[in-house]
Image (spheres, rainbow, N blue to C red):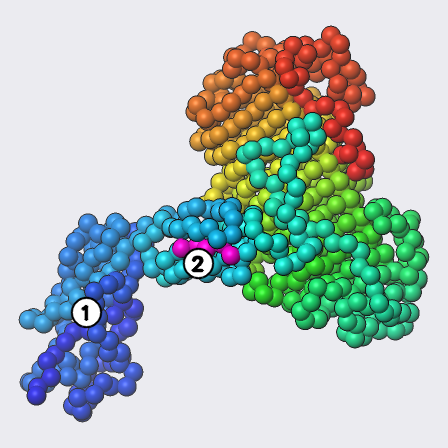
Amino acid sequence: MRNTPRLMLLSTALLFASGCGDLVRPPDTGQPVAGVVTTALLTAAPTTWLFVGESTTLTTTLTPTQTFRRNGRPRGTSITWSSSNPTIGTITSLGVATGVSVGEVTMIATDGTVSESVILGVASAAPLAVTPAVVNDSIGSQHQLTTNTTLPSTWQSSDTAIATVSPSGLLTLRKTGAATIQVRTIKGTMAATAVSVLQGAASADSTITTPPPPPPPTGLLTSDLATLPQRLVTHAYPTSTRTIRVSGGQSLQRAIDTARFGDEIVLANGAVFSENVRLPAKGAGDGWIVIRGESQAVARGTRATPGLLSGVARVQTARNDVAAIEAAPGARGYWLTGFEVTAAPTVTSAYSLLMLDAQVTSTSLLPSRLVLDRMYVHGQDGLQLRRCVMLGADASMIIDSWLAQCHARGFDSQAVLIVTAQGPILVRNNRLEGAGENLMVGGDTPTIAGVFPADIEIIGNYFIKPLAWQSVGWTVKNLLEIKFGQRIDIRSNYFENNWINAQAGRAILIRAANQDAGAPWVRTNDVTFRHNVVTNSASGVQVAADDAYSPYPTNRVAILGNLVDRIGSVTLGGTGSVLLLHGKLKDVDVRANTMVFSPQSTPEGLGVQLDGTGAQGIRISSNVFDGGLYGLMLSGTTAGAPSLTAWAGTSYLFTGNAISAMANRQLPAGNLGLAEGQAVFGFMDFAARNYTPSSSSVLLSLTPVPGVPQKQLNDASLAR
């Protein structure tokens, strides 16, 4: 039986192996020649996928029975190409196929009377997205997840014990907790849905609890637009059954390696350990290994200070860019308390003093239950230190500690950086000194696809940049920056000192940023910033929608009951805005805040600055805004109501606010437009920072009285 010649098409750049020389006829064995691909491409589904606007080259590879005619002359030298639908895909005479619009198209190659075809799929080039982006529901519920692409895709859950997903995207919630559902297309693009299972059986980890109902309105302010953390971490100090004592000159690493859950390792006062300690995984279990200083000089619940921890044991790195303490993959159940961590004076560069992020690529290896309690962690004068603590561990806490001299020149530096973690995380009652950002969530690409931080509480901390740093030249940006994360409660903190340096001097920056385009699944949503004091900064609070690489604009942010004052002092580089709202924000609640410039400022610009267009679901109510010279404005637009409309259309509520520099400018009904300056508000004592309305204050004409009640700032003031 004679073999019928067939033309083989490939969607890769496979060319004739013989190059440009004369073809030499191989023996006609009826079998493929080694190295020549022979694959039937006549299929009923696309074998190659392109994005709209993307091109690829289709080429021919011939088997021996196809290569020669009876007269010995080669075939395949006169192939013509055609497209079944040029509105979906085109192809040139050289076989270059290009996607034009979404759909499927057949590309046909003809050689005389012989023809073959291959089906190409064309998909949208829009950033991949999953709907819904966030799922909060109870155990047993199901949700159909969909994408905005026609590309073949696979679905995966970061924790199948909490949530599973079928090949078609059907999500099933199994157990209380949080998980990320990731979809990956055949082209390698990724997106994700964040899942929180809020009801049902108790979590397997008894230290992670569902929070009680929100307090009544007379207590902490809450917003229906921003969900608070749904899992809280509340570890109790462990009880130990065995003590291992380590003196100076002995090996701390050896003690850690031999310890088991239930042990405490006691470090002798005055001992110095320069071993670059590693916290190894100890296997399954919910026990603890305590590593503590001998003296226990600081009572539980009290913030440590350098003075209180004077003379305690010190763990230090003596090598450049090697951590003093690092967590191994899977490390869990370590409680560190009552000692000092630093770098030796000979060290000139350090990436992280405590590297509690194991840089793993699987959630099964994420460290968990790591606690820093009453610790003194610090750099040295002149040390290039990128961060004091890098935290990539779930169910972990940094509490009652003093993190200082975390600074670098030419690089971002932080007291605490959180990137690869699922949460929950608690950062409470610490002093945090960081030059770039005192604390940042996000800012790098998570090492686990589909994972980003969630359920974080940042409570009662003192964020400060020492003013002496201005003359040293450390790179300065923000006091707090959120680049991605969800369900974050930032409450009762005191933020002090920020100046114009590497950025515009904004104290607080909340935004959605896919760092270096490497994590398309990350997002910023459900961030609550409440009952904080932000003072002595070149600029105040900024909430920004996204950056160039983020497919998900910032949404569901609440700015509630904060004092933002002493903004724009000339000693900090000039005047910024007390509030900047940027881009296509969605569902933002700004309520009961007092935001004013410094007496030492020379206001030349906007108090409330709007930027971009397309915002939705904006509520701004019961605030006191120092408006500088122009009040509230979108650049290039008339101040007041016209700017709000240009920015958010009709999708906003602006009511019950008092704003200066708006006396003769249009505001929506129900607001007070006042003259320029701070005296117009009628505060009790502006110079002494008493912003309670006096008995004759014009603020009393509004119901409720706008601004932050003085009594709600007590906890934040105590954070100093």
Q: Can you tell which quarter of the image residue 624 is in?
A: top right
Visible residue check, residue 485: no
Residue at 8%, 88% (x, y): give it: 1
Mark 1 — residue? Answer: 42
The kind of secondary structure element at disc 1 is loop
Name which residue type carries label 2.
Val
Residue 658: x and y in percent read 62, 16
Q: Pick whichever, 323 or 412, lies toward us.
A: 323
> Which contiguous range is marked in magenta?
170-174
Q: Earlier in the sequence, mark 2 or mark 1?
A: 1
Q: Is residue 275 above or below residue 63?
A: above
Residue at 26%, 74% (x, y): give it: 15
Q: Is residue 266 left or right of residue 635?
A: right
Q: Which mark is residue 165?
A: 2
State the count of labels: 2
Q: Can you tell which quarter of the image residue 253 is in?
A: bottom right
The kind of secondary structure element at disc 2 is strand
Residue 274: x and y in percent read 82, 67
Judge depth for marks 2 and 1 and give the one in front: 2
Whether the magenta-drawn stretch holds residue 660 is answered as no
Visible residue check, residue 296: yes
Residue 475: x and y in percent read 69, 45
Name which residue type carries label 1.
Leu
As measured in the structure, the alpha-carbon distance from the residue carrying label 2 to the one carrying label 1 is 33 Å
Q: Residues within 10 Å of mark 1 (few under 14, many from 20)?
A: some
